[in-house]
Amino acid sequence: MYGGLRCLGNRFFPGRANAASLTGDFVGALAGFDKARLYIPKGGVGVTQGEPDARDTSDPFAAPGDIPFGVPVARPVLGMPCQPVDVAPLLVPPFSRLRAFLELGILGVVMLGAALLLGMLLDQLGFVDEQYNIDSWGNVLGVAVNGAAAIVCIIALTLLRGGRLAEVGLTGRRLAWNVLLGLGAFLAAIAAFQFIGLLITFLAKGQPLNENIGKIKEMLPRMHWLQFLALSFWVGLWEELTFRGFLLTRLRRITGSWWAAILLGAALFALPHMGQQVALAVLPLFVIGIIWSVFTVWRQSLLPAIIGHALFNFAQLFFLFYYKEIVAFFQELAPPPA
C-alpha cells in the first residue's frame, strides 16, 4: 500500500514531497516495514531490500545496515514504474543490539557524571541552599550544561562509529515540509495535553494541575520572553536528540519493533519529569512522547519533534509567567462598554 502511494506521488510530482508520498511514508513507517521494503523500479519488477538480523552473524558488533541485499519476490509485481526510494538511515540503524546497549550505557554514565560535576559546581557558586535545593537560575544553568553534555556525547558516539548524523535524525531532508509539520507536532501535543488535563481536572478536581503550575514557577526564574524562547528551543533540541534521535533508535534495535521502542521511549521520556513536576503530569507527557516519536519515525527527521517540543515549552512558559500581561493586552483591545 505505502509503496503504491509513494510511486503515485513520485510519478506525477518527481522530486517533490507531496501528499501521496507523505502518506505512503507514514503508513510504511508505522506498519513496520523497516526490515524489508518493497520497491518497484523501472520495468515493474519488484525486489525487496532489507537487513539481515544482527543475531545471524558471528560478529556482535556487525553493522546490519551496511549489508544491503536484493531478494526477488515470488512473482513479478505489476505496478506503476517508479524510481527506487533511498533507504532512510533512521529506519536502518547500522549497529548491533549489543552495541545499542553499550552506547545507551555510555550516554547514561556521561549524563550522570555531568550531573554530579554540575551539582558540585552549583554548590560552589552558591546556587544550592542548606536543604540542597537548587536556585531557579541554577536550574537554567543545569539545563544548559546537561544539554551540551548530551549533544556532545551523542554526536561523538555516532561519528566515532563511522556513522552519519542522519542516523539520529539530524538531517535537512525535506526541510520545508518538516518545518511545517513541526507546527502539526506542536498542535497535536497541545491537544493531547489539554484533553488529558481536562480528565485529570475532572477526576482529581484540578488540585494536581494547580500544584504543577506552582512547581514550574518555583523551578524557573521570570525571564524576558526572548530568553524563554531560546531556552525552549535549546531544551527541545537536546531532549529530542536524546530521547527520539538516540534512545528511540537504540530501543528499536534492541526490541526489534518500532511500536515497542516508541512506547518504552515515551515512558523513559516522561518519568524523569516526576522529579520536577507532580506525578500525574507524567500521563500527558507520556502521550506527547508517543506523538513526537511517531512524527520522528514517519519523517525520518528530528525537525518536526524539535519544533513541536520547543513551541510547546515556550507556550507553557509564556502563559505561566506572562498571564497578567496577556489578559491586560486583550482587555485593552476590547471595545469599551456602552
Image (cartoon, rainbow, N blue to C red):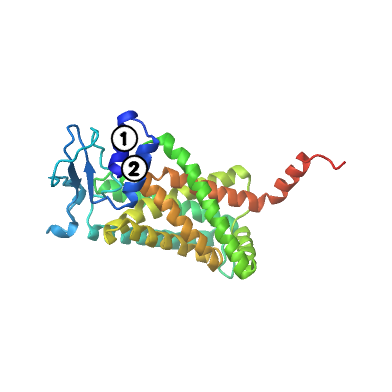
Horizontal and vertical percent for residue 312?
54, 49
The amino acid on which the numbered mark 2 sits, given as a three-letter code, is Gly
Q: Earlier in the sequence, mark 2 or mark 1?
A: 1
- Position of 239 with respect to 83 (left or right) is right
Query: Can you identify the residue that label 1 sits on?
Result: 8
Dot 1, crowdedness within 10 Å: few (<14), some or many (≥20)? many
Instruction: Please indicate whether residue 45 sits to the left or right of residue 92 in the image.
Output: left
Q: Residue at x 44, y 51 (%)?
A: 292
Residue 263 position by quadrant: bottom left
Q: Residue at x 80, y 39 (%)?
A: 335
Labels 2, 1: front one:
1
The residue carrying mark 2 is 24
**Residues at discs 2 and 1 in contact (Cβ within 8 Å):** yes
Q: In the picture provided, is 146 more to the left or to the right than 206?
A: left
- SS at mark 1 in the image: helix
Horizontally, residue 333 falls left or right of residue 25, namely right
